[in-house]
Image (cartoon, rainbow, N blue to C red):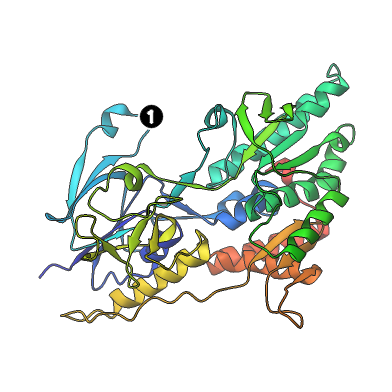
Amino acid sequence: MSKPHIIVVGSGWAGFYLAEYLSTTTYTVTIISPRRTSAYTPLLASAACGLFNFYLAEEPVRSKTRKCRFIKANVTAVDFAARKVRCAPAFEDDDTISNEHFSLEYDYLVLAPGCIPNTFNTPGVAEHALFMKNVSDAMAMRKLLFDLLEKASLPNCPLARKKELLHVAIVGGGPTGVEITAELDDLAHHELHDLYPEVAHHLTISIYDVAPYILGAYDRKLHSYANTALLRRNIGIETNSRIERVDQHALYIKDKGRVPYGMLLWVTGNKAVPLVNKHLPDVRKNEKGLTRILTDSRLRVYQSQNPDEIYDNVFALGDAADILNIPLPTTAEVAVQKAKYLVSYFNTLPTPAPVPTPFTYRETQLVSYIGSRDGIIAGKKGEEGEGWTGRSAWLAWRSGSVMWTRSWRNRAVILLTWMLNLVFGKEIAKM
């Protein structure tokens, strides 16, 4: 008798956790994703700035100890009646193979395709900005940073040009944008100061956000603290900024005009992938904001034709899905908690299956690094649970970096690298 077949669409936080822990003794598990690795997104900025090597910020889906099947492809359609997914191989450099579509049958389907960066249709962003979703993005950031420093170091580079080349513009004042800013600022004041003494002091960082303040997920006391700390280190904070377009060398901001940059990082939020946005007409989705698949409290997908009916054998989680009337943020923590819930359900699934208990999200502390060994944490500490700041918050954030990776080997290597960095400094120029 063949084992039930579970197809998992996506290899992000939710999809990778399912690949790691679903019982391959009970099920045949297939992971379909355009990426053969899963990035630990909270570690990307640290890796880009040399705190540890890039390979520690991602995990391959294929593994000797992981007995699931991996297919490098995009799911382009789902036939829920026939229980089939239609796929297109994900090889952008090979049009022939990419057009050779195929179909796979499933007994259970888990939709976790994630999201893509939201450019808000701003002209020029897709062509000229860097994003921060995968290790390849972090590598591109580091390469560009050193290219800009080398250009600025040329003896025939005028001062005005040096300042333009070494202006890093970060669009997005949420935790990702602020943490990239913090890591870059630390790098500029230490390693780059020693490696590029003639030009490192010209490196400037600016955060641009359409909101009235940065780190809006925190309460006023904490985001005001972060704002003050960043300004004290001469980091530009340009809130209420509406970017109208981008070209290769400058931002064009409403009421502010042209702002030259050398590097543009765009970390403003999420947008639905084409599968969710266009190719799933039979599933119910939310009507406002980020387009997400709607599920019940047991993560089962609602039908679009009969909005109160669910597909018993189809589940959705991660950034691409949300529970009806219980909206949760698009964070790694939410994705992993939902994945743990689903793994527990599948790995204890008898026949016939009982109705599982509803998923309950356990809220965790929100932590952000703001540079110079300083951080902010929302909640709990203090008489009124107003959170806390300072070195203890930074240590909590840094220790969290170790725990995001699921490999004990990688955790040990990260800790060892940190100790070597403290003694000898970062070897960023050699990486």
Residue 212 placement (x, y as % from top left):
70, 49
Find the residue positioned furthest to the left: 1
Q: Quadrant of residue 359?
A: bottom left
Question: Which of 37/109 is in front?
Answer: 109
Other residues around mark 1 within 10 Å, as few (<14) / some (14–19) / many (≥20): few
Q: Residue 94, relative to residue 105: is it above or below?
A: above
Q: Residue 250, relative to residue 77: is it above or below?
A: above
**Callout 1 secondary element:** loop
- Residue where numbered disc 1 is placed: 93
Find the residue positioned furthest to the top: 156
Residue 75 placement (x, y as % from top left):
28, 46
Residue 115 visible to the viewer: yes
| Quadrant position of the C terminus in the picture | top right
Q: Is residue 19 left or right of residue 416?
A: left
| Quadrant position of the N terminus in the picture | bottom left
The residue shown at (34%, 39%) is 90
Q: Residue 4, relative to residue 127: is it above or below?
A: below
Q: Is residue 312 left or right of residue 431?
A: left
Q: Quadrant of residue 6?
A: bottom left
Residue 425 placement (x, y as % from top left):
80, 53
Q: Is residue 263 left or right of residue 280?
A: right
Residue 369 placement (x, y as % from top left):
72, 59
Q: Quadrant of residue 367?
A: bottom right
> Type of residue at label 1?
Asp
Residue 65 visible to the viewer: no
The residue shown at (76%, 24%) is 151
Total of numbered circles in the picture?
1
Q: Residue 190, relative to residue 415: is it above or below?
A: above
Question: Which of 153/165 is in front?
Answer: 165
